[in-house]
Amino acid sequence: MPNTVKDSKNRVVLYHLIAILVVSIWGATLVNTKVVIQGGMRPEEVFLSRYIIAYLAMWTLSYKRLWSANIKDELLMVACGILGGSLYFIPENFAVQVGSVNDISFILCTSPLFTMFLAILFLKEKLTKSLAIGSMIALIGVSFIIFGGNNDSTIASNRLLGDALALLSTVCFGAYCLLLRPLGRKYGAAFITRKMFFYGSLTSLPLFIITPWQFPLENFLTDLPVTLNLLFLSLVASFFCFGAWSYVTEKVGAVKVANYNYFSPICTVIISAIFLGEEMTVEAALGSALILIGVFFANKNK
């Protein structure tokens, strides 16, 4: 009996360690994206390549079902592919190209707030006191990040554009999370994610009509930094982390696991300092702290 209890505790510890690993990997993805873009790929090319590889990999987990149960659900899948895929990642990638990955990571951390506000607007959920106070704190933090910092006009304008694009991505992801609620009650996570990868890739194709693909395909074989970082984004950050996150969420619970998301931007700051040499301004550091406090406070009574 004691061994059984010990084994159970060890498994719980393992689940939490997996959650920390996944969040650490997600914290690195903005840096990986920056490296790939600096290697010559355009933001939309990074997105399409990442999603196609991840989509093909997802067939190993979800291969029995092709379509949703009805047209309405299939259209919701399309919306998820747009809001959680093309309209989320492409602006985010452009933000990474021109802005600071540290700023972007903390702005993206506010997505749960937008999910809750959209739920209040469209699902008539109640606005709690903790949500109102936490949101105000977080939004003050966002304003510190967006409007504080470097005095160089070119750098400041680039960071402002990057922060604005990150905010757009955050709103889209908040809406995506809201759409997932009815779908999550009817379909498995692997099926939904595979459909999202497909429709996200599909809805990004019109961009290539405007500006055709430019990155030489042979560079995937010769430019190892680009290829390895892209494979990391596709197979590790998207495919592996999805499976691992779904597994630990099932074992530990969504609320407990979600708290580890606050660790992600901290990982971004550490990794970007090592590989990109990025430094945080005093205003950005203060804003980042306010965002973490605000989002945590807003979610504490969920």
Image (cartoon, rainbow, N blue to C red):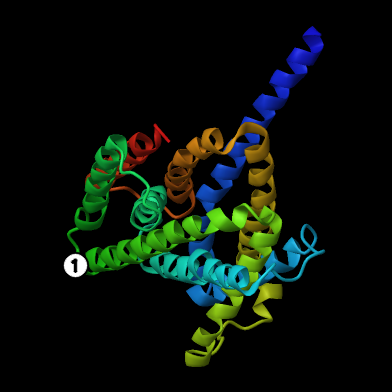
x%, y% of residue 46? 56, 71
Which one is in front, 116 or 219? 116
x%, y% of residue 146? 25, 57
From the image, tell me which residue sits under label 1.
Answer: 153
The reply to whether residue 119 is in sight is yes
Residue at x 35%, y 66% (from the top left corner)? 165
Q: Quadrant of the C terminus?
A: top left
Which one is in front, 191 or 265? 191
Type of the residue with mark 1: Ser
Q: How many marks?
A: 1
Which one is in front, 36 or 73? 73
Characterize the local packing of mark 1: few (<14), some (14-19) or many (20 or more) Cα atoms within 10 angstroms: few
x%, y% of residue 84? 51, 63
Residue at x 69%, y 52% (from the top left corner)? 240
x%, y% of residue 254? 56, 39
Q: Based on the displayed image, in which of its 4 quarters is residue 73 positioned?
A: bottom right
Say if 243 sits above or below 226 in the image: above
Residue at x 66%, y 39% (from the top left corner)? 250
